[in-house]
Amino acid sequence: MKKSILIPTDFSENSKSALSYALKLYANETCTFYFLNSYAFSSSRSPSLMSSNFIGTFRDNSKRDLTKLKAKMDEENTNTNHTFGMISSSDELPHAIEASIKQHDIDLVVMGTKGAIGVDAFFFGSYTVKTIKHIKSCPVLVVLNKQDFKTPKKIAFPTDFNRPYDAKTLKTLQDFASLYDAHINVLHINVEEDLSEKQNKNISILKEYLKDTEHSFHWMPAYHKKSDVINVLY
């Protein structure tokens, strides 16, 4: 089944890394990759102060750079499984992504980020986190800048077992694992002495859904940071 992958891009090294990773990840899948560029003004600049000509320049530059990127990929990418499309939008990026998901029936959004530096900063960068929180209709894969592609053989699925799993979430997890026959490690961090009836019910649902997929359950002690717990498992 053909997949539709959305690659938001500002033509930076971050977005190039995301594209490169996505192309390798789905090398054996038939896909259309849509390049999305948002030329919306930042919140610190008022559109009312900009002339229509200036706004038009942003729009024209967006379309020009998207056309160059598509032409480059059409020429350099020899994978016949892959085709490319372009989307230029005047909406803020999260809204542009949401609209693109609906219009093109997107299966996955792949975003690039160089992360953040500082104790109080988000690991993924504030704008990436904002987008992840906004997008609820489609899974988002975040790729760190210059991240080398490695065949995914293990997938961590952290869960508290409290919320019911919707079919789309589980299907995305299963489909991702099936790309390279990856093993799913279901990870639960112990913050309670005993699981509730609801949690046990959700565990049963998860086990039933994953019965035909290689998986295992892991109960881990609660360290100071959840990232530390995940690192122990891997």
Image: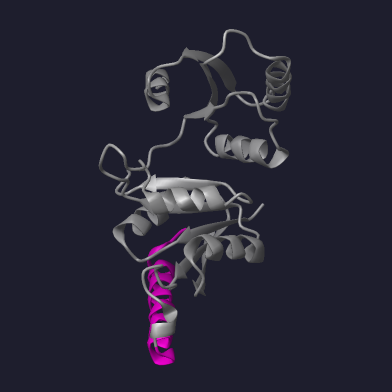
Please provide percent x and percent y for residue 114: 31, 49
Kindly indicate the quadrant of the structure image that contains residue 122.
Answer: top left
Q: Main secondary structure of the magenta part?
A: helix
Task: Identify the magenta region.
Answer: 51-79
User: Does 10 appear above or below 159?
Assistant: below
User: Does 123 appear above or below 216?
Assistant: below
Is 14 placed left or right of 60 in the picture? Answer: left
Say which residue appears at 48% left-offset and 46% top-offset. 141
Is 41 placed left or right of 135 in the picture? Answer: left
Please provide percent x and percent y for residue 207: 69, 21
Is 160 placed left or right of 42 in the picture? Answer: right
Quarter containing the C terminus: top left
Q: Is residue 7 visible?
A: yes
Q: Is residue 75 magenta?
A: yes
Q: Is residue 31 magenta?
A: no
Say which residue appears at 39% left-offset and 50% top-offset. 126
